Structures are given as C-alpha cells and as structure tokens.
Image (spheres, rainbow, N blue to C red):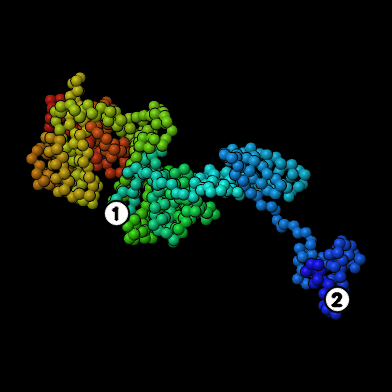
Amino acid sequence: MSEATKQLNKAAAPEGGPGGRRGGHMPAAEYCAGLLRYLAGEPLAQVAAETGRSVSSYYRQARNMGLRKRDLGIPTRRKGPAPVTVQTLEGSAMAVACGDLSVPFDRDHPETAVDVMFEQASGFFSANNMKEAAVRLRMIEMVRRVTMGWRGGRPPRATVPEPDSVEEDDVAAAPVALRPAQTPPGGDWSTWLFLGGRGAGKTLAGASWLADQAERLGPGGRLALIGPTLHDVREVMIDGVSGVRALPRWTRATRPRFEASRRRLVFANGCLAYAFSAEKPDGLRGPQFSAAWADEFCAWRCGGARGAAETLALLRMGLRLPLKREEGGPGHPRLVVTTTPRPTRALVRLREEASCVLTHAPTADNAEHLSPGFLDGLNALYGGTRRAAQELEGRIVELDGALFTAAMMARARAGGREGAAAPFERVVVAIDPAATARGDACGLIAAASRRRADGVRCATVLADRSIAGLGPDAWARRAVALAREVGATTIVAEVNQGGDMVRAVLKTAGAKLRVREVRATRGKYVRAEPVAALYEQGRILHAGMFEALEEELMAFGGEMESSASLDRADALVWAMTDLLIDAPEGGRGPRISWL
C-alpha cells in the first residue's frame, strides 16, 4: 500500500479524519474517499461526476493534504518547449535537435539546413500548427548562433564532448610578433600616430596596444574605441580579423565580451572599453577614460563644419583618468591614432604636435600576410601615382591642383643614385631659419648641381637635416656641421624672420664659407612654381628617401598649405633657386635677393 493510500484512509476514517466540510459543502472525508476510488483504478472524471464535484476540486483537496500529482500517480507534462541541443559529428558535420526532431547541417555551409527548416516552418504556419513552427524557428536560431560562434573563432559547445579532449580555444596561443612600426614608441608621449598603407597592420597594432592597457588597468579601467561609424568600430576594431576579440592571447574564458545594447567591450578582468562613432562627437561629452584608440582618423566625417578635429578635441577632453604604465606607476592618459593618411589639416596639425610620436609602415612591410600577387597587381596599375603613394606607401600626398605630384617624387627618387655618384659643380646648404626654439622647424637642405651628358645642368638633394625645437645657436651649428659634411661652398639663408641675426649666429657657430642672404618678397606658391617645373623636367633628383620633405612639397597648393609648416620645402626652393635658377650658365650665381 502506498503512502498516499495510507494517508487517505486515515483521513477518510470517521474517528481520525478532518472535521468540518471542505471544498463547498462536501466533507473532506468524502473527498478522500473519492481519491481512494481513483487510486483503486476508477477514472477521476467519473468519480467527480457521481459526487457532483469537479476534477480540479479533487486536485485542490489533495494539495491541501500535502499530496502531489506524482504521489497520486497522475502523469505530469513538461512546462514550456523542449530545449534545443547541438551535437558535433565527424569533421564539420553537426546536428541540431529539439525533442524528436533532428536536422543535420555542415557548420561551414549552414544555409542548406536553414532552407529546409524554413520550408518546414512555412508548412506548419499554413496548417496553423504554431507549436511546431516555433520549434523550427528556435532550431534555425540555434544554427545561426553556432555558425556565428564558429566563424568568430569560438568552436560550438557540443552536448556530448569527446572524452579526454581539450578544446583548442581553451589554450591561449603565442602572442603575435609585431614589427617595430607596430609597437608603441618609447618616451613620454601623449599621442602615438601610426600612418600606414592598406593592409600594413594598423588595426593589429591598435588592438594589441588597447588590450595591453586593459590588462594593466584591471577592474574599473575605462577605455575608448572611436571609428568612422559604430559599424566600423564593431566589425573592424572589435570583431575584425585583426580586432581586439580576435587576438590570439585570449582563451574562451578570457575573451572580451561585447555588449551591443550598451556599446561596450567587457574584459575578463573587469576593464571596460566603450564604442563611439566619429559621426556623433557630442557622444564623447561626459565620459572619461584612461586611454583611447582612434582608427582611420582621416575617414572621420562629422556633421556641420566641425570635422574630425572637433571629435578629436572632445575625445581628448575625456582623457582625464590616470593610466598605469608597464612598470606599474601611474601616468598621464594616452591616445593611439591609426590611419591611412590623407592630406587634411587635422592630420597635419596632429602630426606636428610636440607630444605626438610617429611611426610609419607601407603595405609592402606586411606582404607576407597578404594575398600573393596583391601588391604586384596594384603596383602595375597605380605605381608612381598619387593613389599608390597614399594608399600603399602610407604617405601624405598632394591634392588636385598641387604643384608637386607623387609622380614627380617617384621620378626624382628613381634617378637619385646616379645623381649622387656624379661629380658636382657646386654644393650648397639652404636654411629656412626658425627665429625661436618654440616656433616652426628650421629647414636645412643640402643640394648640389652638376651637368648631364647633354650639357643640361641638374641638381641633387643630398640631405634633409631639418629639425624643430632648437634655438638660433643650435640650428646654426647644425647647419655648419652639415656644410662640412657635404663639402658645401655656400650657405643660402632666408633672412625675412631673423634679419642680421641669421648671419651673426652662423658666424658665431663657426661658418667660414660664403653666406648668401635671400629675402622672400612673394608668396610660397609663386616662389615654388619654377622649382616644380624643374621637377617636371626631371632636372631635380633625390639621393635618398626624404619622406617628410616630399610630403611638404606635395602640400604646395593643396588643402594643407594654409596650416602646414613648409620649412623643409622652403629650404629646398631656396637651394634649387640658387643652383639652377639664379645661377648663370657659367656657374656660380650673383649674390642677389629674390625679387
């Protein structure tokens, strides 16, 4: 006899049963008698009909006595739909199951299984079988989740794992070997600007640096991720193939989690990285951070006339939390900017900041990780053009209408080796002086002239020793040292800013050679036009790769000219004017100013 039967017999006995009436006017003992008849095999519905009560009233009386359905032998059913499970089969084959339904699919090609289940769901909808249609839709959602997880680098969780197996994702891989240009520079900088061509590894550099900061900051750390759009932040900076979550340093347990609703990346140690769009700079008002990574700065587009500079300014105002450096001590906040350059004022101003350090990498440096033939194909199509210089070499190049073009610079470099080896007629050092140590850079260019086999006089740029942050005595000594190094016979110095001071400081610095003073009476563009014509004729060569000089030359006449410091370019213009324009065919030119 079961415990339920014993309890009901005791409750139904007149001497031991509960007194009074329960469930309306029917005594509790009569309810117990009816339940005993049900346990003896009679249908409960028949018992309830004979006694004039409902089946639910008998269930309620059983609950009042502490009896459960399974105590009475009443079958129970599961509440809610059956769970959807995933089983891993051989190779890339998998199966998703829900109850008695099971559909196989290939995780690399899940569309076949999804198509089948959608067709089945359509049939259920037409038959008004909403329960089965809901099951199919939940199975389709599971296929989507498993597929997305696998493509994101997370093997799907199998319901029956293989014995003694170790998931590859549970072990962190070796760190990625970064090139020097991809590693943070030394020194006490506030902004690291990484200029590179397409596919040069800029995203990997920014993601690795941000992950390092998150690991050092730990719980409570706050970082910022800023891209051209929120879509770019998530698809490139966070979930891209070189993004933060794709770094091999993570395991399944430590991989950061992206919360799309809150637009933030949550690291395992509690550090948070918030995502922002450069399209909405006002979103940066209020939050504060210890470090930030800004990607594709030159592609930022904001509403109105504010532009990328406004977004950058608001971002910097939020960089006000201390940053723990590698050695463990507190430090000031830092910003990393990775971008393929464009000739914009915002980029030029950023590059010229005293606290900004620059690294550069062309696409060719990362060729081993690119598709075979990718670089060769693009060089065949765009080699020597402005597009190649900007998108592949990662250099700031000219805008439409600029005096100096990328093709001119490429041709000057191509013949530079021959020009450097030829005997020279004259060698000069040209100076565009900086009047104070806090002003613009001091342009120092060494150049020499020679005659080609056809008798045409040409010139070769030998060195660019331009430098910023030096006072008059310091740059004068640097100019004298350069003149001795290249064997110059003349120093050409602009005296618009310094006047007699320029000659005086050169003499004090030990200059024994001739100093030619020149004075600019017309604008930079007008002075540079004859020199641009010489470049176009192939009469000026470069005995080396002078990236900063070439970028300044290509800024003449473009958007950057009004904001950029063109000290190197100015010095080169004075050098070429002295060697090729003012000089008569007999050789050395007269000591005259530019008129």
Q: For residue 413, which numbered disc appears in the image?
A: none
Badge 2 marks a residue whose secondary structure is loop
Badge 1: residue crowd in 10 Å (few <14, some 14–19, many ≥20): few
For the point 14% across and 38% down, which residue is it? 485
Q: Which of label 1 and label 2 is nearer to you?
A: 2
Task: Tell me where residue 283 appears, x and y as whole percent.
Answer: 47, 55
Q: Residue 349: in sight, yes or no? A: no
Task: Tell me where residue 249 appears, x and y as whole percent.
Answer: 43, 49
Q: For residue 13, which numbered disc appears in the image?
A: 2
Check the image and report above or below for 203 versus 7: above
* Depth check, front residue: 237 or 431: 237
Q: For residue 188, which numbered disc appears in the image?
A: 1
328 with respect to 575 (left or right): right
The alpha-carbon separation of the residues under discs 1 and 2 comes to 92 Å
For the point 62% across and 46% down, which residue is it? 87
Q: Residue 357: in sight, yes or no? A: yes
Image label count: 2
**Amino acid type, callout 2:** Ala
